[in-house]
Amino acid sequence: MFRRPILFCASLVLVSGIAGAAWWRSAPQPKWEDTSADLPIPPFPPRIAEGSTYETCLDTLASDPTGAVALAATWQADGGGDGAVHCHGLALIASGQPASGAEVLEQLARQSSAPAMARASVLSQATQARMMVAQADKAVEDATQALSLSPDDTELFIMRATAEGVLGRFQDAVDDVSQALRQDAQRPDALVLRAMMRRKLNQLDLAQADVSRALTLDPDDPDALLERGILRQRLGDPAGARADWERARGVDPNSTTADLAQQDLSLLEAGPTAQ
């Protein structure tokens, strides 16, 4: 369904080393600080509904989320069915009301007679919305319900693992990411996420193995470089940590990962008394 991981901004707390990682088009790289750039639209397939009004409403989400709320509400009042409810939930999220939007999506998934895969997709969007407002417990619930409908969905395992990590349930997160990797071993993002969780469990050797494998798959993955720097710093290799963080910062200088790498570099330069 999706491709890149869902290191929700809540999980950035898990990523940072010394200091501590289009939500509808192709999903998971949501950033809390810029949700307008990453809105979740339904994948192809499955769709919860079809039709020109549904497409128009979805197309309005990014350009005019308030207008999409009004359009969906009117359409709902006219008997628009699942499509109207779905667009309404997404429009609420796009207009800055993720919790309200998640509630709409959760109710839709419970009440809809659409195929299981389509309802799982709706719940995955609700999961992302819950994470946008730091409701990781509800995100876990949504992802768990979605997995009951789509038990082989790699992305859902990664979503739930991310939320579990925010809750401090690191072993549960490792278990879920491991399941995702059994289904798709060529996922640097999942390997980095598992490395972060293993670091939190102080399983540094296993974390190193994961991040090394991630960098074998993608030598320029900035999240993997950031994480390896964290591990190197933990293991007493500040020069190696510095090299990784400088490289992570250089891959995409305007990214959140680059900001985290810079924070870690600044703390490294300041010395132990600043940490």
Image: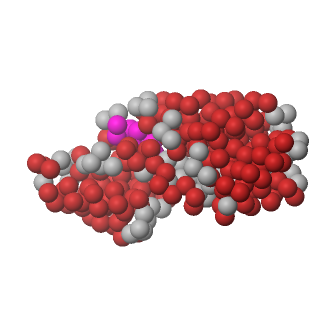
- Residue extending furthest toward the left: 273
Q: Residue at x 10, y 48 (%)?
A: 273
Q: Is residue 1 left or right of residue 268?
A: right
Q: Position of residue 178 (x, y in %)?
A: 52, 38
Q: Vertically, is 253 above or below 204? A: below
Q: Residue at x 69, y 44 (%)?
A: 89
> Which one is nearer the viewer's eye here, 88 or 255?
88
- The answer to whether residue 234 is seen in the rendering is yes
- The answer to whether residue 206 is seen in the rendering is no
194 in magenta: yes
Q: Residue at x 51, y 41 (%)?
A: 133
Q: Vertically, is 82 above or below 70? A: above
Q: How is the image coloured?
A: secondary structure
**Highlighted magenta segment, given as a residue range:** 191-200
Predominant SS of the magenta segment:
helix
Quarter of the image holding residue 219?
bottom left
Give the number of callouts. 0
Q: Is residue 69 left or right of residue 204?
A: right
> Which one is nearer the viewer's eye here, 82 or 191?
82
Q: Is residue 227 left or right of residue 157?
A: left
Q: Residue at x 34, y 40 (%)?
A: 199
213 in magenta: no
Q: Position of residue 188 (x, y in %)?
A: 50, 53
Quarter of the image holding residue 48?
top right
